[in-house]
Amino acid sequence: MGEADLVVLVAEADRRTGAATAGMSREEAVDTGTTWAGLVRTHARMLSDWHHHGAYESVVYVLGGRLRMESGPDGANVVEAVAGDFLLVPRGAIHREGNPDDLEGTVVVMRSGSGPSVVNVEGPARGRT
């Protein structure tokens, strides 16, 4: 049995500051190059900048608060999740998070893929007119 076969504990004190997007605080717990996991806090009444996660597919689990996610052409696709809900964010999906509540929100994020885990962009794709 080698070291690669051992379970690794990542304690709260071991988490690192993750990539920045305005309005949110990311705490990176795991980054293996193909898997990313961490805790994200959304500030009260915030609306993040537009971004995507490159070649990563993301699964988001809402621990507390409410999470609003806008995506699609002109950001017109809107979903709201509450504690206990999961969200799936496809690879390359441009989106932004919002927290419509007066309290901080907390989510756990797991990503599978490669490359940069966060790419900040100017805005969503434009709809056809």
Image (spheres, grey):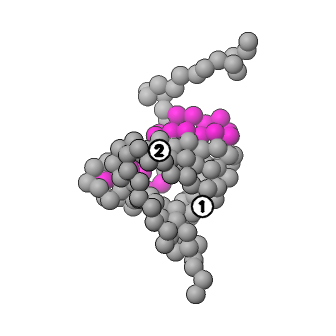
**Residue at 68% in and 46% down:** 113
| 69 to the left or right of 34 | left
**Residue at 69% in and 19% down:** 5
Disc 1 crowd, CA 10 A, few/some/many (<14, 14-19, 20+): some
Q: Residue beneath label 2, please?
A: 61
Instruction: Report the number of numbered marks.
Output: 2
Can I make out residue 106 in this image? no
In this view, the residue in front, 51 or 105, is 105
| SS majority, magenta | strand
Q: Residue beneath label 1, please?
A: 93
- Quarter location, residue 127: bottom right
Confirm or deny contact between disc 1 and disc 2 (CB under 8 A). Answer: no
Q: Verify whether residue 122 appears in magenta.
A: no
Q: What stretch is highlighted in magenta?
A: 21-44
| Residue located farthest toward the right when viewing the structure as drawn | 1
**Residue at 47% in and 41% down:** 108
Of the 4 image quadrants, the one containing the C terminus is: bottom right
| 10 to the left or right of 83 | right
| Residue located farthest toward the front when viewing the structure as drawn | 84
Identify residue type, mark 1: Ala
